């Protein structure tokens, strides 16, 4: 792996490190909102018991039934700020409505929880990469095990929000 890169280790929580060489690295940020948060919230919201079950539920759900999108506020894209209508404006933002709460499935809730946590991780990673002026972000950790949804979301977020200047990289054996 060519240096430098940002290493984002996503387990129960998240640690973000700048890696400039084999013996030149430091923790620059992190968050307590990681895989443990995803699993805990999923268990509370859906009654699931395991990470694998939570991921399975999330693969069948639609976060757009739970989240408030840009188009829900502005009726479409918010062109002045370059925000597409399908972008999440508020995670779980539709759940203040009793009717909306009654119409969502546990799969939708699991998917929204996964999207919420993943978007937060992606946002922190992007800001850290920008602050450190590093264009490669490597995501590792057990949260990414059997979790293609988050890998796709992170790859898209890094590319989209950086206008193509940041690349998300994933290891083949992400849990180690």
Image: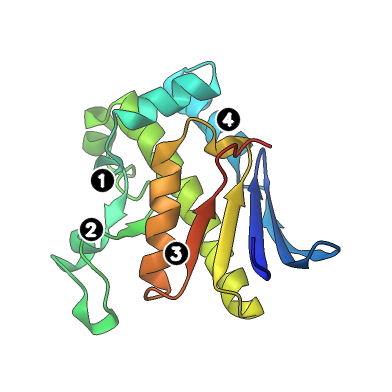
Q: Name the residue furthest bottom.
A: 80
Q: Is residue 152 left or right of residue 140?
A: left
Q: Which residue is mark 2?
A: 86
State which tag comes first along the sequence, 2 or 3: 2
Q: Is residue 16 left or right of residue 104?
A: right
The reply to whether callout 2 and callout 1 are in contact (CB within 8 Å) is: yes
In the rendered view of the protein, which quadrant contains the N terminus? Answer: bottom right
Numbered label attached to residue 38: none
For label 1, count other residues whose C-alpha is less than 10 Å away and answer few (under 14), some (14-19) or many (20+).
many
Marks 4 and 2 sit apart, C-alpha to C-alpha, by 27 Å
Report the mark closest to the observer, 4 or 2: 2
The reply to whether callout 3 and callout 4 are in contact (CB within 8 Å) is: no
Q: Which residue is mark 1?
A: 64
Q: Name the residue rendered at 20%, 63% in the picture.
A: 85
Q: Nearer the viewer, residue 134 or 87?
A: 134
Marks 4 and 1 sit apart, C-alpha to C-alpha, by 21 Å
Q: Is residue 80 above or below residue 109?
A: below
Q: Is residue 61 left or right of residue 161?
A: left
The reply to whether callout 4 and callout 2 are in contact (CB within 8 Å) is: no
Q: Name the residue rendered at 29%, 32% in the picture.
A: 61
Q: Which residue is mark 3?
A: 158
Q: Toward which corner of the image does residue 144 lie, by quadrant?
A: top right
In the rendered view of the protein, which quadrant contains the C terminus? Answer: top right
State which tag comes first along the sequence, 3 or 4: 4
Q: How is the image coloured?
A: rainbow
The reply to whether callout 1 and callout 3 are in contact (CB within 8 Å) is: no
Q: Name the residue rendered at 48%, 70% in the picture.
A: 166
For label 2, count other residues whose C-alpha is less than 10 Å away and answer few (under 14), some (14-19) or many (20+).
some
Report the mark closest to the observer, 3 or 4: 3
Q: Which residue is mark 4?
A: 40
Q: Residue 105 at x, y = what percent? A: 28, 26
State which tag comes first along the sequence, 1 or 3: 1
């Amino acid at each position: 792996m060519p240096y430098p890169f940002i290493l984002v280790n996503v387990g129960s929580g998240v640690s973000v490190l700048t890696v400039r060489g084999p013996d030149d690295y430091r923790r620059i940020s992190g968050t307590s909102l990681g895989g443990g948060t995803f699993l805990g919230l999923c268990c509370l919201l859906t009654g699931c018991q395991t990470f694998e079950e939570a991921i399975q539920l999330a693969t069948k759900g639609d976060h757009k039934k739970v989240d408030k999108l840009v188009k829900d506020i502005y009726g479409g894209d918010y062109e002045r700020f370059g925000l597409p209508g399908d972008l999440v404006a508020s995670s779980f933002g539709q759940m203040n409505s009793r009717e909306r709460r009654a119409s969502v499935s546990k799969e939708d809730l699991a998917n929204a929880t996964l999207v919420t946590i993943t978007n937060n991780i992606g946002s922190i990673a992007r800001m850290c990469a920008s602050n450190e002026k590093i264009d490669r972000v490597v995501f590792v950790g057990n949260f990414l095990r059997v979790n293609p949804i988050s890998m796709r979301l992170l790859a898209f977020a890094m590319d989209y929000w950086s206008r193509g200047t940041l690349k998300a990289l994933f290891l083949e054996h992400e849990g180690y």
